[in-house]
Image (tube, rainbow, N blue to C red):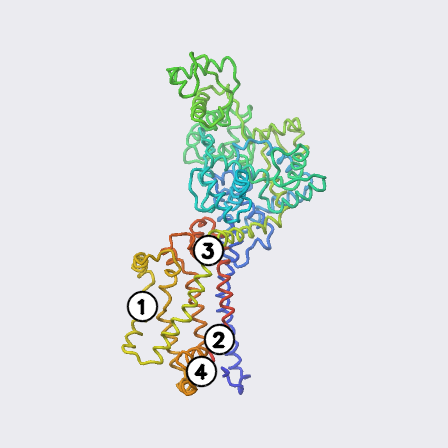
Amino acid sequence: MSHLPTVGRKHWKSRFYLFSLYILLSFMAITMVVPFLITVGGSATNDFDYQRFSPVPRFLYSQEDRYVKELTKYFNNYRGWDRQFRAYYTEAPAHWSSWMKIGENTELSDEFALKYLKVFRSDRERQEFIAQDYSEFMDTYPMMDTQVSLEQIEAIEFLRQYYTDQYLQQHPEAKNLSNSDLRAASLKLLSDTWQTPYATYYAIKFRSESKYPMEFQSWYPPAMDPKYADYLKIKDAYRKQMFVPGLEDQWLEYAQSKGLAAKFPIAQDADQKTLDTWQQFKAQQAPASMVIPFALRAEWYRFLSENEIAQNIAGIALSQKFTIAEYNQLAGTNYTQLNTTPFPIPQDFGPKMQELWKYFVKNKYPLRLSSFEVTAETQKLYTQFIEKEIKVIRIANELIGTNHDSWDQFQVTGSAPEGFSKEEQNARSIWMNFIKSLELKYHQKTSSEIAYQKFLTEKYGNVEKVNQTYGWELARIEEAFPPLATAYTSTFLKNEGAMTKTPVLKNYRMIFDFLILNGKALGVTFILVLLTIIATLTINPICAYSLSRFNLPGQSKVILFMLATMAFPAMVSAIPAYLLMRDLGMLNTFTTLVLPGAANGMAIFILKGFFDSLPQELYEAATIDGASEMQIFKMVAMPMVKPILAINCVSAFIGAYNGWEWALIICQDQDMWTLAVWMYQASQWWKESPWIVSAGFVVISIPTMIVFLSTQKIILKGIVVPSMK
């Protein structure tokens, strides 16, 4: 029956009514669709833009937004990243202390990105040359003095492949194992190697490794435990550009054009021609790896700006901030920004600045970057130092692992002793204490800045030649700094499409792998849903039909009791139900998962109302035709209540598919976990990466949408049931 009569439908009131109705329905549809689109959009974000909660991510149509978004992966998740970021990107505002804040101010972030993009576009050939030199410099820079914003997705992929290869090398016969068995075997090998039991690869994180205090004077890379050794392998894979989206296909094509049968990534034992070709290709196509040299000048600027001792030496009141004006006054210079001043301090700077620098070197400069020349004088000083500090030769031998008879036999090394045994670590501690006691005239300092300045000097000769080649305007070589910004811009522009698309696909690939391939969640969920729907289509209709057709004793009380169960949350009965199932020995079984929800009071009550509404003549006619009660139930009553059965099936599906609380309580065995339980686990593991969780919500909502779309026609028929009577 039409909602409006045909007569008068063209009247302005009727038209206004219809228009209002469509507007209301459209608004309601939008309120349902937009949250889902925000979830879909959130799965394509990262720390930079997740908090925007936009249904259409801005990076899809803004290159500047993409530039800053991808830069997030270079500076994130490690100690002091914001100071390192401002050291490399001198145009970054001082208040940019988190990527969320950077992403909130789109106008400022666009302006920031545009500055670097414009510089590169205006002088592309020279900028690419600078980026290639940076790549060459990074090929030999020590890994010990670098940082990396390690992503868990890529770390897991690397470890799984590495330990799978290791397991197959140890057990060649295992190559016929299934993927799940091979994954379990490789995980066990990793757990045994690290001496830490892991139930899944996804529980592996490198939080402590990413928080190493590289700015501390006495910090040195930790003992060579197996986990740290694998962390270094992952770090080296980042330096080899193993995780740059799309680079593998480009390299294989490039190598083929050069007549090389190369693989990806390049092995250390590859022939020299392959190594040279790879370095040339990498310098051209992806010069900026995510492994970044530690910028010590960031700590020098921090010392000047925040340290009270620095202010006392400079003669600045504690209430006054150390600015570029004070710097120029002390140094006798005219710089415009503090973070563009030289590092290290040149010898011709003023005495106050020299005093500040000496204090920084003596008390702040990392000892891992210090060394000295071994001469007869320094050897004598070391002998005196060790004799004074330890006093007993026997104890000194036990500490260092030697067997000397006199103090003169203890030889000093110019740099910190290598190795990670207990004795070698003791020797390194003694060496660090010794170099701290040495006068500064003996010290030889290095850092990423000094190493890069040395690289430029050896390659171009002097600062004038560097300026001529790079188009810079350096007054002294100490102003030169590794041009990561230029190298990143080159890498971004040459791989923009893949760098934008691949991380999104990685989120979905990881969550799909986690939910589908991790454990037996897919099969368990399918069986659970199937059993639940079977129970819904049998138990509830039979109960409702019986209550409708037969005048059972105490029927009203039974109905009241069923409805009363709806007044209490399911979790109220969770503990008693768990204890009951435990006592019955039914934990970790499908029976336990299905049984508590097999009969639903509300579903029975609604079905009874539908059965009551059916004409009694239908039952009487079927009885006259000789149909049994079961035949009447199956052939007369059930077809008439298809709409409500469809609704009950959808409700039962949603309850079984999305219900994680009961499944988690009743099944401690992970092999019995459903997709919902694994999704809950994912939300706990990746709470710091909510875009991965958003991807999981999108993936896990697809079956619900399919079920609803496949049953909507049957459900809508319920609207016209009264007209069928």
What residue type is disc 4 on? Pro
Quarter of the image where one finds residue 640 = bottom left
- Of the image marks 1 and 4, the number of the one nearer the N terminus: 1
Callout 4: SS? helix
What residue type is disc 2 on? Leu
Q: Nearer the viewer, residue 216 or 158?
A: 158
Callout 3: SS? helix
Q: How crowded is mark 3: few (under 14 residues within 10 Å), some or many (20 or more)?
A: many
Name the mark on residue 521: 3
> Vertically, is 368 above or below 282?
above
Which mark is nearer the camera, 3 or 1?
A: 3
Tell me the distance, in whole angstroms, between the alpha carbons under discs 1 and 4. 30 Å
Q: Residues within 10 Å of mark 2 (few under 14, many from 20)?
A: some
Tell me the distance, in whole angstroms, between the alpha carbons under discs 3 and 1. 30 Å
Tell me the distance, in whole angstroms, between the alpha carbons under discs 2 and 4. 12 Å
Tell me the distance, in whole angstroms, between the alpha carbons under discs 3 and 4. 42 Å
Callout 2: SS? helix
Residue 391: x %, y % from top left: 37, 15
Q: Which of 217 and 393 is in front in this view?
A: 393
Give the residue number, with chain letter if any, for mark 1: 565
Tell me the distance, in whole angstroms, between the alpha carbons under discs 1 and 2. 28 Å
Give the residue number, with chain letter if any, for mark 2: 716
Callout 1: SS? helix
Give the residue number, with chain letter if any, for mark 4: 722
